[in-house]
Image (cartoon, grey):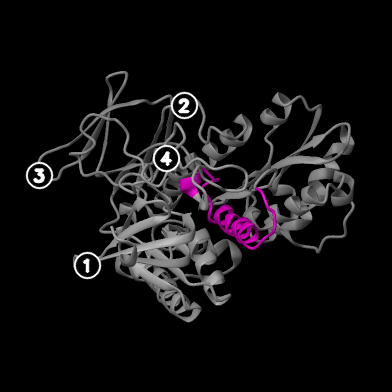
Amino acid sequence: MSEHEIEDVDLLVVGGGKAGKSLAMDRAKAGWRVVMVERDKIGGTCINVACIPTKALVGSARSLLSARHAARMGVVVDGAPAIDLDRLRAHKEGVVGGMVTAHVKMFADSGMDFVLCTARFVGERTVQIRTNAGATRLVRGREVVINTGTTPAVPDLPGVAEAQVWNSETILHLERLPESLLIVGGGYVGCEFASMFAIFGTRVTLLHRGEQLLPREDLDIAGALADILTDQGVDVRLGARAGAVRREPANGDVVVTLADGSEVRAQELLVATGRTPVTADLGLDIAGVGLTNRGFVAVDDHLRTTADHVWAAGDVAGSPQFTHASWNDFRILRANLTGRDATITGRLVPYAVFITPELARVGLTETEARAQGHDVRVARLPVSAIPRAKTVHDAVGTWKAVVDAETDQILGAALLGHNSGEVISAVQMAMLGKLPYQQVRDAVITHPTMGEGLNLLFDTLADQ
């Protein structure tokens, strides 16, 4: 590799996820020479196979549910509401396609050099870019960012590779709506798809090896969520450990053999057992970039890797696997690359699980707070007590908040119910401002809104 073959740039971004693409466009607009290499997804995982298409489909499921319940709102809908698969697919692809097209234009307008192909490190801060046509380029960045994301994990289950099962990406092809669906994995992804497909009319069986769904949540919240799924028609089976998978001949049913020897079957199987970082075949060892024992790129609290002037962001860096966390990684990287100092230490990352209704959470669970030694007070409120929920006939769920008994500051909240994903930001702002819960309790909040429920939620602490 001779020196004159190498293109030197100010910023080289390998992987065009939320953090990488945002930084690439920002720096290109600032006058930096930027090359961004993305393997196959213009705009990143979120737009193509994660947040955007799944939430588009969640929107469809909720529209169907609203149509089914229209009569109780005084609206007459002729005929039984049903899913039209072609239109459903067109809706999802239209949303995704529009955002991909917008990103192509944004990339071009920013002035960056966007390359859709594969890259592999061949030296310090240097990659070889190989196009599908076989052409190659060598690019070296003064600064380098790795933002290659994650991919669905494949569990070590005998027969799973041969059974033509779905994962959280391939299920979005929507080749058909199966009459029955098995889901292995009771985490966030498994629960979202279970709720969605049950509303679509599929018979869903959810198999989870643990004794509660959503292992990171408190038992009472996980139990309430399981009850909602059950009411939607999902057969929730806890403590169900899958032992083997097979597909019956002639593209027949998928059969899962459980650890106790029993079998369950359905037309299709979705494996939702987490995601694994995309680090293989990148040549990271050649670049001096180390990995954690779980295979993620090792970073410090500034998102620096073990190699000088090489950074990592988003899922591949072990950040919380949410697009908004990757967006915050971008802001941290921009600060650190432009002479300021920013870290991920202590950041407060909320999230929402888009079952219907949704679960939104921020901060510590009750279990985590007690484990950290806090003396806590717990506020609880049924969503049915919130006036707005009554007006829309969507009063399922429960809200919970954890408060430090000494400081009165909010340590965390889990809101399960209508539009909870919108309300959780108000709790987050109160936590960032270190407000005592009484200021949220006594705030004048618009009536009737779901946010008004925060008054009622924290008012329950008066009874304690």
Q: Residue at x 24, y 36 (%)?
A: 160
- Is residue 319 a member of the stretch shown in magenta? yes
Which residue is located at x 89 percent, y 38 percent?
462
How far across and how far down the image is residue 419, in percent? 63, 57
Residue 250's label in the rendered image is 3
User: In this rendering, is residue 429 above or below 63?
Assistant: above
Q: Quadrant of residue 118?
A: bottom left
Q: Earlier along the polypeptide chain: callout 3 or callout 4?
A: 3
Amino acid type at image mark 1: Ala
The residue that mark 2 highlights is 210
Q: What secondary structure prevails in the magenta region?
A: helix
Observer-side mark, 4 or 1, equals 1
Q: Nearer the viewer, mark 2 or mark 4?
A: 4
| C-alpha separation, residue under disc 4 versus residue under disc 1 | 35 Å
* Residue type marked 3: Ala
Circle 2 sits in a helix, a strand or a loop, which is it?
loop
Residue located at (42% from left, 48% from top): 193
Q: Height in image: 328 above or below 299?
A: below
169 shown above or below 240: below
- Which labelled disc corresponds to residue 135? 1
Give the extent of the magenta segment: 315-343
Could you tell me the amino acid type at mark 2? Gly
Q: CA distance from mark 2 to mark 1?
A: 49 Å
Q: Which residue is mark 4?
A: 274
Q: Residues within 10 Å of mark 1 (few under 14, many from 20)?
A: few
Label 4 SS: loop
Callout 3 crowding tier (Cα within 10 Å): few <14, some 14–19, many ≥20: few
